[in-house]
Image: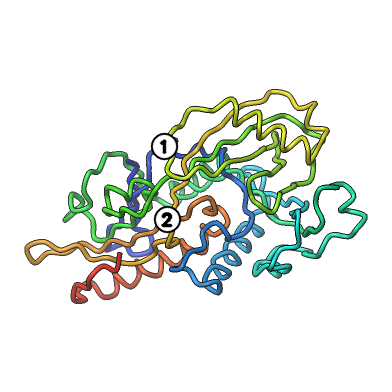
Amino acid sequence: MPILSASSAHPEITFLLLTRNKGAHTPTDATETAWHGFNVHGPDTPIPTLKQWFRETFDHLFAIANSAEAKDAGVHLVSGWQIFRSIPAEEVPFWADVVLGFRKMTKAELKKFPQHVFGHAFTTLKCESPAYLPWLEKRLKGSGVLILTRRIGDLWELHPSFDVVVNCSGLGSRQLAQDSEMFPMRGQVLNVRAPWVKHFIRDGSGLTYIYPGTSNVILGGTRQQGDWNLSPDAEISRGIFSRCCALEPSLQGACDIREKVGLRPFRPAGVRLQTEFLAQDGRRLPVVHHYGHGSGGISVHWGTALEAARLVSECVQAPRTPTPKSNL
């Protein structure tokens, strides 16, 4: 399990960030689009909070897209449509004023999708994780962050070596945080070459989408609750390709088709973002839990990370606060 020790903000404090093994559950190129925060919403996450996370993340990625680092970071603007077979109850979603140029689709635009009666047109951001994550890691190392690798079976193993632990272990939190609410949401996508496809298309159900990138196009998808299978299913792939071709017939000419499978760390209550103080024999270890983003992690990752950093600062500033009960 990768362990990141960061001490640049508070040189006197040793931090630990726990993440899941790279590729252990979610191939980074299977989920890589900044879209909106719907898929991380739960009863523990009020809409105003979700919108704040999304806005902070969008602003962060927009700044990268508008910089010389955009290519290396894998972040760029992309325009397109979200379409519906019936008029949705919420015609203007909460994130409408965060993305760029949001508007309802015209009748002329909807002619492209004869099976759909309503849609949104807007510009958002594409964040390609196979480029973005190494770019972030490079920046961390450049700031003096030490990255270690070791397997952890219990969070208390980290005491007393670390002063604060940030638990970002995703599905690993089933064991590490003993969170029985965590389960996988299996996602299968196709990665194809179709350089003529320039606009994203997403069916309102969220199960059919076309996301063009810098060198490929992602076709999706699935949401299979509780399924741990990481092997591609040929029948599912055929269904994805057929549905996407129905929205964009030119995809029938796509080549270099590759199947990708990932397990999204889903939590019905929403993101767990809180501090827990582990205690044994009068000693304690502050743990900031930061997991359960489901398939919307890219959409809100920077916003939730800012909140996690605030919780870490609270731990640093008040290291002797009485131990509260976890509200897991």
SS under mark 1: loop
Determine the image quadrant of residue 245: top right
Q: How many marks?
A: 2
Amino acid at dot 2: Arg
Assess disc 1: are there few (<14), some (14-19) or many (≥20) residues with their C-alpha within 10 Å of its C-alpha: some
SS under mark 2: loop
Position in image of residue 18 (x %, y %): 34, 49
* Residue occupying the point 59% across, 28% down: 259
Position in image of residue 138 (x %, y %): 49, 44
Position in image of residue 187 (x %, y %): 53, 40
Of 243 and 136, which appears nearest the observer?
243
Q: Quadrant of the N terminus?
A: top left
Determine the image quadrant of residue 121: bottom right
Assess disc 2: are there few (<14), some (14-19) or many (≥20) residues with their C-alpha within 10 Å of its C-alpha: many
Position in image of residue 144 (x %, y %): 40, 50
Asked if labels 1 and 2 touch by Cβ distance under 8 angstroms, the answer is no
How far is the residue under mark 2 from the one under mark 1?
Answer: 15 Å
Q: Is residue 298 left or right of residue 26?
A: right
Q: Disc number at residue 228? A: 1
Location of residue 88 with respect to 209 vertically, above or below: below
Location of residue 47 with respect to 301 vertically, above or below: below
The residue that label 2 is drawn on is 267
Q: Disc number at residue 151? A: none
